[in-house]
Amino acid sequence: MPAIAKTGPDEIVDAARALLEQHGLDGLTMMAVAERVGVRAPSLYKRVGDRRALLELVVHATAEDLAGRAEAARHRDPVDTIRAQADGLRAFAHEQPAAFGLLFGVHGAPTPDPADTARTVQPLLEATTELVGDAHALDAARLVVAWANGFITMELAGAFRLGDDVERAWVWGRDRIVASLG
Amino acid sequence: MPAIAKTGPDEIVDAARALLEQHGLDGLTMMAVAERVGVRAPSLYKRVGDRRALLELVVHATAEDLAGRAEAARHRDPVDTIRAQADGLRAFAHEQPAAFGLLFGVHGAPTPDPADTARTVQPLLEATTELVGDAHALDAARLVVAWANGFITMELAGAFRLGDDVERAWVWGRDRIVASLG
DNA sequence: ACCTGAACACCGTTCAAGT
DNA sequence: ACCTGAACACCGTTCAAGT
């Protein structure tokens, strides 16, 4: 007998991303995803392997999203590009904090596709190459990304507890780093 | 009837920390902790409230550990202190990667005691005060900590996939940051 | 006082049976 | 082809009953 599919992998991944942001990683259960796409949990296994595989799809979708933004934030001036890459990463993290945490956290989450990672870093790498030269372009890119990721992660975790202006700390740190590459 | 306690909170926290490093956060189950301390899972609830409370104890113990190390890594020269704080944090993370991830990750883990956080940052804050003055001491400390946390987190997550020397990137970044504060 | 088996809720996953 | 109820394993948690 025919039997039309009620859902596909895309709807499932979208549902999973929504649940991730709304209820955290623990709220992203197979049962909750199933309910959201209008199906019973066992049916999901015909589409996505298992929960781990679904997390991989979520990571992949998030990484693609981020790569697209990074590519869109290029400027003529390498200093402008570096600032835009850092600010863009932060904006992305504020929009999708849980997905950002999944992508850059430590705890055994799936790793993004190397190709997406490469696309994401590329514009920054071009800018640092222009600023500091080939020999240290990668070191410089790692400096910028490490600082931005660390700052954003601490910000999202509420780790800046000594008061004062977090916004100012971002700009101050960002511009110190940019200046140190000049 | 008497009935001597078979275990106390300290053994339970030690068991939990060991499980965390050996089997990850998912391996830190109440049943596994119970088995390690020689008791059945229900008995743990007379000692630690619940799993969440146990995680808080683990975070607290880890944060105290880290604070002690930070205090032990002071030097006369503020530049030496900053280097030592960054290197010490990294050494700590390499020894207890899972605990480090729990402490600095994003995902709804318990937050360390503010007092422990303050102790941990204090030596760095004194050094940055000496280097850049009161007005930007906190901004500078945040720059250093954000970079170090971000670098270490990416390193532990295996996010440095573009090859090359990670060790060199650490030293290069660290010394750029220190120099930018001079 | 402290410990435990039994029980319940919840989640991931499999599979035989339905359409 | 696709979907589902039933079932199993595993974990967190509670509680009445044991010593």
Image (spheres, coloured by chain):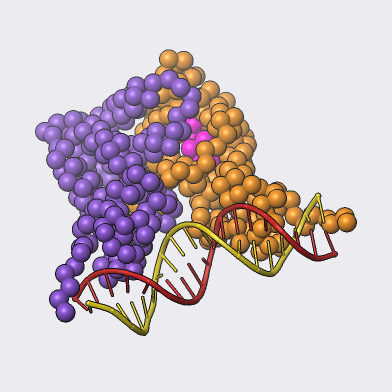
Chain colours: A purple, B orange, C yellow, D red
Find residue A44 and report its horizontal and vertical position in percent. 30, 66
User: Given the current orientation, which residue lies at the most extreme right position?
Assistant: B1
Residue occupying image coordinates x 39% and y 39%: A153
Find residue A172 and report its horizontal and vertical position in percent. 33, 23
Find residue A26 and report its horizontal and vertical position in percent. 42, 52
Q: Quadrant of residue A95?
A: top left
In the displayed structure, A181 sits above or below A31; it is: above
Q: Is residue B162 visible?
A: no
In the displayed structure, B164 sits above or below A156; it is: below
Residue occupying image coordinates x 26% and y 67%: A47
Taking depth in this image into account, of A121 and B77 the one nearest to the observer is A121
Quadrant (top left/top right/bottom left/bottom right) for the C terminus of chain A:
top left
Q: Is residue A180 left or right of residue B20?
A: left
Q: Is residue B76 visible?
A: yes
Find residue D18 and report its horizontal and vertical position in percent. 80, 65
Residue occupying image coordinates x 58% and y 43%: B56
Q: Is residue B22 left or right of residue B155?
A: right
Q: Quadrant of residue B148?
A: top left
Question: For residue B158: magenta?
Answer: no
Q: Bounds of the magenta span?
A: B82-90
In the displayed structure, A96 sits above or below A112; it is: above
User: Given the current orientation, which residue lies at the most extreme left position?
Assistant: A76
SS assignment for the magenta stretch, majority: helix
In the displayed structure, A89 sits above or below D19; it is: above
